[in-house]
Amino acid sequence: MPHAAQLSLQEAMSPAMEEVIFLHDHVLLLTCLMSLVILMFTITTTTSTLTHNDPTEEAEQLEAAWTAAPIMILILTALPSVRSLYLMEEVFNPYLTIKTTGHQWYWNYEYSDGTQLSFDSYMVQTMDLQNGSPRLLEVDHRMIMPMGLQIRMVVTAEDVLHSWTIPSLGVKVDAVPGRLNQLPLASSRSGVFFGQCSEICGANHSFMPIAVESTPLNQFELWLTSEQ
């Protein structure tokens, strides 16, 4: 759940977001270590009287070091990045497929795989909010998904470019008219997760929120049966 003046990433509510936070911490650690080494090297070379100032002197060991070091840093950055990208893109035996279509300025959700359920999701106006509901994030019809199971999201748009984004679940996928983009989606705990359209799509772009509710499987099946 986002809150005012938040500086850090939202708490991870899915395996994908856990991978994102791990990659962030990994790259941040490498960046801090590199900055520290460069700072120490700069201070040493500018203050020490033991350094050589002859620009014509060869330094093969130094050249080898500053060639090998960036290569190692790039490898240490690339390996976890490739792993995270693979896990966030690959769909493994999904329990359910949900098609999401972006419109100006609302979302449509269509449940498939043997079900016949489709509904639109609009932002709840400020004067209609219940106590405790987040302003500009609550919707009149949340997308419901089963907790702990992977689902396949198919995302497209009807009119202009949109972007379906849930930060706490670690997902962001463009909704492009005439094209289907897919991604795996799973939540590691129950709750309500909020996001917003992340692609400028017109006058009411800021009023196109996303709300996903994750429930235990038995509650999800009861909801699905009651909605059909």
Image: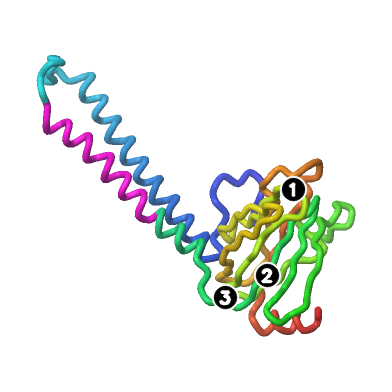
Work out how far the residue at label 3 is from the one at label 1, CA to CA, in angstroms.
28 Å
Dots 3, 2 in contact, CB < 8 A: no
Per the image, label 2 sits on a secondary structure element best described as: strand
- Snapshot colouring: rainbow
Q: Give coordinates of residue 165: x percent, y percent.
A: 64, 55
Q: Which kind of residue does numbered mark 3 sit on? A: Pro
Q: Quick check: is 150 in the magenta stretch?
A: no
Q: Which kind of residue does numbered mark 2 sit on? A: Ile
Sequence-wise, which precedes: disc 3 or disc 1? 3
Per the image, label 1 sits on a secondary structure element best described as: loop
Dots 1, 2 in contact, CB < 8 A: no
Secondary structure, magenta segment, majority class: helix
Q: Which residue is mark 2?
A: 98
Q: Which kind of residue does numbered mark 1 sit on? A: Val
Q: Which residue is mark 3?
A: 94
Residue 48 horizontal side relative to residue 103, left or right: left
Looking at the rendering, in which quadrant would you find the C terminus?
Answer: bottom right
Looking at the rendering, in which quadrant would you find the N terminus?
Answer: bottom right
Per the image, label 3 sits on a secondary structure element best described as: loop
Q: Residue at x 85, y 52 (%)?
A: 126
Q: Residues within 10 Å of mark 1 (few under 14, many from 20)?
A: some
Residue extent of the magenta highlight: 59-80
Q: Residue at x 60, y 54 (%)?
A: 172
Work out how far the residue at label 3 is from the one at label 2, CA to CA, in angstroms.
10 Å
Q: Is residue 115 above or below residue 181?
A: below
Q: Which residue is mark 1?
A: 160
Discs 1/2, front: 1
Quarter occupied by residue 86: bottom left
Sequence-wise, which precedes: disc 1 or disc 2? 2
